[in-house]
Amino acid sequence: MRAVLIANPQATSTTAATRDVLAHALSDVVKLEVAPTRYRGHAAEIARAAVAEGVDLVIAHGGDGTVNEVVNGMLTDATPGQPPSGGRAPLLGVVPGGSANVFARALGLPKDPVEATHRLLLAIAADTSRLVGLGRANDRWFTFNAGVGWDADVVAEVDRLRGRGREVTPALYARTALSCYFRVSRRAPQITVRVDDEPPVTGLHTAFVANTDPWTYLGSRPMRMNPGTTFDTGLGVFSLRDMNAYAVLRYIAQMLRGSAKPHGRNALRRADVGRIHVACQEPLRLQVDGDNLGERSVIEFVSVPDALRVAV
């Protein structure tokens, strides 16, 4: 089996020593090439080349951003409604190396990279894998979540602070979310959402789109925005009509409660849907899997079942 290990040396919990240990362990069972990333988008380029060269297994070692790039590189030529079939795309392996690792944890993989590598080796030996559904936001694939508005503003601001040398922690995300909330709450609602063939809903402040549950984590605490959403269902969407502080805090408490489904008259929530059309009166930021994609006026979210095979 030919494999390529795409490792992001800048990921939060990735070190050269850990990468070497992982590579040594994997080299015992596969013909391995190690490919460290050097710049934004490089992981996608490496994954795209691996597909063209007929590599059997592409392993993403880094945070959720690295996984997202690898998936987009692997599925460059795939389109919604025509997911890869047969041997067209290699198998994906995931070894967490970031801070949140939402996709890996949703798959039930260990957060520790050494333990995750051991799990991957067992999957290779037993030839076990599973198909997962993915989401698509315009021309970008996402594995676990996407969002327009508030959460995308948070992602953009955290990226800015990271570029200035700030350490990315749950506390930083929480403080940034609070400061972005005050800006969003003062802004007139800009968003219209149409779910499948339902009538459009106007006057919304934000749109959170989920491909699985949890939506994300605050440290070890899962945020469960749409518990009915899994890799085997369609997408989930959660939007707010009002940014009233009391209501927002109540929804956040519901999301942190465990299996509770956030609900209330102020919210639009749907689960297991195939298509979500989001239109913004003015361009708003879009994020996918915690990656800032800049501003968009129209975003078409599409659920693509069985889009990718993952070693588990």
Image (cartoon, rainbow, N blue to C red):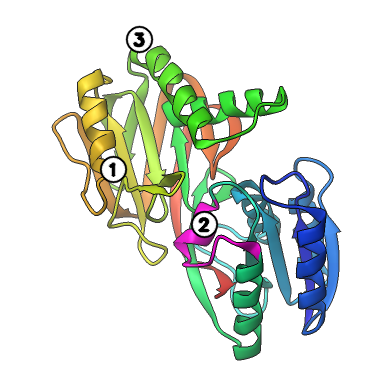
Upstream in sequence: badge 3 or badge 1:
3
Density class for disc 1 (Cα within 10 Å; few <14, some 14-19, many ≥20) is many
Q: Say which residue appears at 86% left-offset and 69% top-offset.
A: 33
First to last magenta residue range: 101-113
According to the image, label 1 marks what residue?
A: 255
Q: CA distance from mark 2 to mark 1?
A: 18 Å
* Secondary structure beneath label 2: helix
Residue situated in front as seen by the camera: 190 or 175: 175
State if disc 1 and disc 2 touch (CB < 8 Å). Answer: no
Look at the image and say whether residue 104 sits in the magenta stretch.
Answer: yes
According to the image, label 3 marks what residue?
A: 186
Density class for disc 3 (Cα within 10 Å; few <14, some 14-19, many ≥20) is few
- Kind of residue at badge 1: Met
Residue situated in front as seen by the camera: 72 or 192: 72
Q: Which mark is residue 103?
A: 2
Upstream in sequence: badge 2 or badge 1:
2
